[in-house]
Every structure is written in C-alpha cells, then in structure tokens.
Image: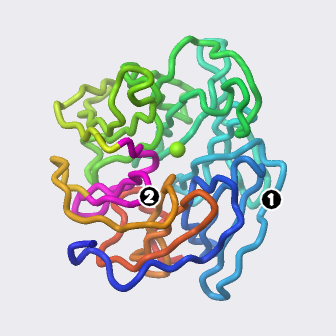
Amino acid sequence: MGAGLTVGALECLFTGSVWAEGPLWVPSSQTVRWSDIPNDRILEFDPATGLTREYARGVGFSNGRTLDADGTVIQCSHGRRRVERDRGGAVTGLIGSFRGRMLNSPNDVVVARDSSIWFTDPPYGILPGTKEGHEGEQEYGGCYVFRFQPAEGILTPMITDLVHPNGLAFSSDESVLYVADTAGPAHGVPLRVVAYDVRGDACHRNGTALELEDGHAADGLRVDVQDRIWTSAGPAVRIYSPSFELLGTVEVPERVSNLCFGGPDGQDLYITATTSLYRIRTTTRGAHNVGSQEPA
Ligand code: MG
C-alpha cells in the first residue's frame, strides 16, 4: 500500500502501447505525453476528456522526456541517437555526439535549475535485434550519464561507473542524483538505483544504493517534494526514503517503465507500464522538473 502517500485506486487510462515509456505532464496543454517506443509514436492523454490521441508518429523512437526552464519539452531519441527539443511539434537536435562519436541511445533526461541537461545513454536502442531503434555500434565505448550545458555547448561525462544507466532524478536541492542501472546480473551487477553526491563538476557515489533482489528492475524514477524516491520496480511503483527504506508500494498489473507527477495540482502520479498508462492520486508532488508540476 501507499502508506498514506496515495489515495484511492489505481486507474487504467489507456491500453494499446507495446512498450510505454517517458511520461511527462505538459503544463501548456494540460496533458500527459509519453512514448510508445516500438510503435515509434508519441501519445497524449487529456485528463479533461479522458481521451488519448496520437501526438506524432515516426518520431525517431523517442523515450524519456522532461521540461526545460522555458517549459519546452526535451526528449531522448533512440533512433536519432540524440537528445532533442520539441517546440510545439518542431523537433531539433541538441546533443548527438561525444568527442566526435555518436551517442548510444539516450534514454532518460532531466534539466537542473542551472539549465544543464542531464541524460543517460545505455545501448537499448542500438542492440542487435532491437525493436526500439536501429542496430548500431557503441561508438565511444561506454554508457555514461552526461551533463550538457546549452549556453556553452559543453558536454561532460559525469558518471561513467554504471553499466546501463537508465532512469535518473535529482533530490529536491539537487545535491544528490539518483540513477537506475538496468544492466543486472547478466552483466555482473545487481539491478539497482545508485545515489551520487553532486559537487560542482563531479559526481561521487555517496554509499547509498538500492539493490533490487527480486529480479525487478528499477527504470524510471522521480523524487517528491519531501525527497522520497518513487521508482518503477517490476510490476509496481515503490516509494523509498532517501536512505532507501521502503515506505510504500503501488501494485500495477503490468511491468512499470516510468512515472511522472502531474495533473492540475501536480498530485496525480502517471505511470507508464508496458501496454498502458495508469494514474493514482497522491498526497504529494514532484520535486523535480518543477515546471511540469506547476499549474499552467
Ligand atoms: Mg528508461
């Protein structure tokens, strides 16, 4: 149960994706936008009407998304191997290479208060047989968490010691960055969420980590205003304290990929899970991606 952090029952709002990912509350349209990656399309749910529409198709296998300080959508593209900006449907690339080599397949992204864009770059969109992009080489030879400073055009690898960095979220004061690693035992590491202290131009593991020992991966995650961590964990959303004490669980009928806070007051939790979009009411709001929480 949600330990007083959720209210009422989980609702299924839409079914019909193959692999739903990358949910984001878009204040300007008061909708939830998300990716249906294998179908190479972006969907939008309008809570005012209860209807879902196709926002765009042939979208370069988009994945995670967030807002910048202007409220513009920043999204990851597996197929175009880049991080890009979507301004009302006009999509332009922001970051596609590191030291002259292509990125792997950017997966998830957050924007810090200083406008820097932080994103993960695992290989899921370029692996042999992928249905979430196009097969390709890992050109720079790693899977990093990067920070991009748009004003200066500087791309910096901030975390290089994870195997498949995936979901990521800052603590409310941005002193800690939580990063999910979905590589798992096949790669010799646990399924985990690792906490890093962020100090200037460096990230250091602070010794706090969550290891999921039941075979359920943490993929997308968010932090609320009281610094609780809301993470996907197999067929559930789990809520943890900053030291990873389990505070609550929201069971979901399908495997969860990602989640976001949203709705008119920011207290609705939207959950992408395999074929479907779900929602549950909460008693809190998201700490990060502040723009996505604010009423328009
Ligand atoms: Mg992901």
* Residue ranking furthest to the right: 58
Q: Could you say which disc has been placed on residue 56 in the image?
A: 1
Q: Is residue 256 magenta?
A: no
- In the image, 166 versus 216, the foreground residue is 216
Which residues, given as a range, are shown in magenta?
A: 215-239
Does residue 81 lie above or below 117 as drawn? above
Identify the residue at image location x=31%, y=62%: 224
Q: Residues within 10 Å of mark 1 (few under 14, many from 20)?
A: few
Neighbor class of circle 2 (other Cα within 10 Å; few <14, some 14-19, many 20+) is some
Number of on-image labels: 2
| Secondary structure of the residue carrying numbered label 2 | loop
Q: Residue at x 27, y 33 (%)?
A: 196
Q: Amino acid at mark 1?
A: Ala
Give the numbered dot on residue 257: none
Give the number of the mark in front: 1 or 2.
2
Residue 288, placed above or below residue 159: below
Determine the residue positioned at 45% across, 43% down.
167
Name above or below for residue 73 compared with residue 10.
above
Residue type at mark 2: give it. Pro
Alpha carbon distance from label 1 to label 2: 28 Å
Q: Looking at the figure, which quarter contains the N terminus?
A: bottom left
Nearer the N terminus, badge 1 or badge 2? 1
Q: Position of residue 10 (x, y in %)?
A: 44, 78
Question: Horizontal and vertical percent for residue 286?
Answer: 37, 64
- Discs 1, 2 touching: Cβ within 8 Å: no
Residue under label 2, please give it: 235
Find numbered disc 1 in the image and state the secondary structure of the residue it sits on: strand
Q: Nearer the viewer, residue 235 or 85?
A: 235
Q: Residue at x 41, y 30 (%)?
A: 184
Locate the C terminus and report the quarter of the image it occupies: bottom right
Q: Is residue 73 left or right of residue 270?
A: right
Residue 272 image offset from top left, x and y in percent: 55, 61
